[in-house]
């Protein structure tokens, strides 16, 4: 793919990509540790990659990406895979919705680029007509330069009840194609949505914005000082990333850009656009987007279907066999299976809340958990023990660490690893092993040219991932 190395535009627009959401309505595909934005759901690229690629070249600068600290290395890896080098990756210690994330980006851009125009975009939307999207951004520039906070309203194709709407008002002065926002409206019922579609002048709220850093900061300060004062306080810049301070960011009010600013300001403007947009907010939306077979089914993965109609079926784990169903959603991963209807697919979010309350790990992580050094998969667990299959990439290294509550036994099954246990360091290969008692410093490094695979057997009174005390880490993790 094309890289973002280009001559600086005369009036640059700074893309700000918000990638902190969990995408819970697409569980079990989307999890907290590997959310929707990092998944390839519409093309061969992830949704984050698609978002970044559509703002390559003039008048756009390299993007600023705001993401969860847990996703730092996944984001870096995915951007590198498409040849994009972000201007900065902002690491949030916890989710605080879109207004604090945009506030950090605005403060950073104002300090480093003056009163910059910033294009704020979710990382997990589909836009099929990129040319129309870019034309809409160009249309919004005059109003944004004049101090407007511009959003983009999607021309509705059907009476959707799952989106908020924007009602357009009078034309914005000296900005052809841009209008004042008359009002923002929450998700309507079916009859209301049908009446708006027939009436015209109502558009789906895309959640994409163009405004200057100064305009946004000023409007946000009037609305809620808890966001503007706290968002970037104590942040640490390590070169590649801006690491936000956990205590300060936790004091930010969790609120969206719409609720914090757009619904209150008198400077809200909207550019209507048709650009093949979807927020991919449910499996119903995925089904609508995809190419279906002659029976109206969208089928992916290891699936056998007979007498099935108008359904979304995906098998990313075991074989899925379906017979005689209609309007269904069936999604199987290595550790979970979801069965619902297309109509009820929005309710998956409530199901994930049940998993959280039950302290089920499946809400947060896939069976395969990625780390900057490689990945691991839990292959068995019980009372007082856990067995993992760990893969360390070439030149990858776990941190020098210890565990207070568990012992570990490592068995090398492939590759060559340098193992540190206390004061002893040894090089081990296939069929050799090491034992690490509790409270003992240890590290595992791949010193071979291929992957290092080990079986790790944990035993102890507590086996949680938070039982780690790190002393050294090549990836800068605390």
Image (spheres, rainbow, N blue to C red):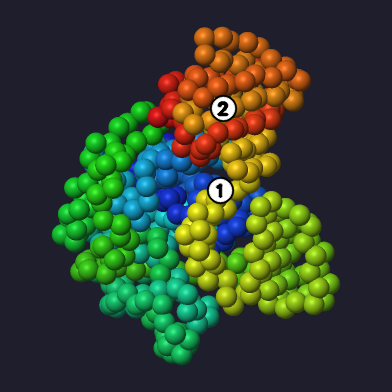
Q: Determine whether the residue tagged by mark 2 lies in a helix, strand or loop.
A: strand
Tag 1: Cα neighbours inside 10 Å, few (<14), some, or many (≥20)? some
Instruction: Give residue 89's quadrant in the image.
Output: top left
Residue 55 located left or right of residue 324: left
Q: Is 38 located above or below residue 150 in the figure?
A: above
Residue at 59% over, 33% down? 459
Q: Earlier in the sequence, mark 2 or mark 1?
A: 1
The percent coordinates of residue 332 (x first, y second) are: 69, 59
Tag 2: Cα neighbours inside 10 Å, few (<14), some, or many (≥20)? many
Q: Nearer the viewer, mark 2 or mark 1?
A: 2
Task: Estimate the spatial distance between the alpha carbons at disc 2 and disc 1, rounded to whole Å.
Answer: 23 Å
| Residue position for label 1 | 365
The percent coordinates of residue 205 (x first, y second) are: 40, 70
Q: How many marks?
A: 2
Question: For this rendering, which residue is in front, 343 or 19?
Answer: 343
Residue 172 located left or right of residue 453: left
Question: For this rendering, which residue is in front, 426 or 236?
Answer: 426
Q: Is residue 77 visible?
A: no
Q: Is residue 170 visible?
A: yes
Query: In the rendered image, which quarter contains the C terminus?
Result: top left
Residue at 57% over, 71% down? 345
The percent coordinates of residue 92 (x first, y second) are: 37, 44
Query: In the rendered image, which quarter contains the N terminus?
Result: top right
Question: For this rendering, which residue is in front, 248 or 87?
Answer: 248
Residue at 22% over, 46% down? 230
| Residue position for label 2 | 407
Residue at 40% over, 74% down? 164
The percent coordinates of residue 82 (x first, y second) are: 57, 40
Q: Is 293 located above or below residue 62 in the figure?
A: below
Q: Determine whether the residue tagged by mark 1 lies in a helix, strand or loop.
A: loop
Residue 288 located left or right of residue 4: right
Question: For this rendering, which residue is in front, 301 or 59?
Answer: 301
């Amino acid at each position: 793919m094309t890289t973002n190395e280009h001559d600086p535009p005369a009036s640059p627009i700074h893309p700000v990509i918000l990638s902190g959401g969990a995408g819970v309505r697409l569980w079990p595909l989307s999890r907290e540790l590997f959310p929707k934005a990092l998944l390839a759901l519409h093309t061969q690229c992830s949704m984050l990659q698609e978002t970044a690629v559509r703002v390559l070249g003039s008048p756009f600068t390299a993007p600023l990406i705001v993401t969860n600290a847990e996703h730092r290395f996944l984001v870096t890896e995915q951007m590198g895979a498409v040849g994009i080098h972000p201007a900065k990756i902002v690491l949030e210690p916890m989710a605080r919705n879109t207004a604090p994330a945009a506030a950090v980006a605005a403060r950073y851009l104002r300090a480093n680029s003056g009163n910059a125009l910033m294009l704020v975009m979710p990382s997990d939307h589909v836009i099929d007509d990129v040319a129309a999207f870019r034309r809409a951004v160009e249309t919004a520039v005059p109003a944004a330069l004049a101090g407007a906070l511009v959003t983009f309203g999607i021309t509705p194709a059907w009476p959707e009840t799952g989106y908020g709407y924007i009602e357009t008002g009078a034309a914005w002065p000296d900005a052809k194609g841009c209008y004042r926002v008359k009002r923002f409206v929450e998700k309507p019922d079916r009859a209301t949505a049908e009446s708006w579609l027939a009436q015209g002048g109502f558009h789906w709220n895309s959640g994409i914005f163009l405004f200057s850093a100064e305009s946004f900061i000023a409007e946000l300060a009037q609305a809620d000082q808890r966001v503007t004062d706290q968002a970037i306080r104590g942040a640490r810049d390590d070169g590649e990333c801006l690491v936000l301070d956990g205590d300060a960011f936790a004091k930010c009010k969790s609120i969206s850009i719409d609720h914090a600013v757009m619904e209150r300001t008198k400077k809200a403007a909207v550019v209507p656009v048709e650009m093949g947009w979807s927020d991919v907010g449910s499996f119903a939306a995925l089904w609508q987007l995809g190419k279906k077979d002659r029976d109206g089914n969208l089928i992916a993965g290891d699936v056998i279907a007979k007498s099935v109609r108008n359904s979304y079926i995906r098998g990313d784990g075991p074989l899925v066999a379906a017979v005689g169903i209609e309007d269904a959603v069936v999604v199987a991963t290595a550790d979970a299976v979801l069965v619902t209807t297309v109509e009820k697919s929005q309710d998956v979010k409530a199901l994930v809340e049940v998993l959280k309350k039950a302290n089920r790990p499946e809400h947060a992580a896939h069976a395969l958990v990625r780390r900057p050094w490689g990945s691991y998969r839990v292959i068995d667990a019980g009372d007082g023990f856990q067995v993992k299959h760990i893969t360390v990439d070439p030149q990858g290294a776990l941190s020098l660490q210890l565990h207070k509550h568990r012992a570990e036994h490592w068995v090398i099954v492939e590759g060559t690893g340098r193992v540190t246990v206390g004061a002893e360091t040894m090089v081990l290969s296939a069929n050799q092993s090491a034992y690490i008692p509790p409270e003992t410093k240890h590290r595992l490094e791949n010193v071979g040219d291929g992957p290092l695979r080990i079986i790790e057997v944990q035993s102890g009174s507590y086996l949680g991932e938070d039982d780690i005390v790190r002393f050294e880490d090549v990836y800068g993790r605390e």
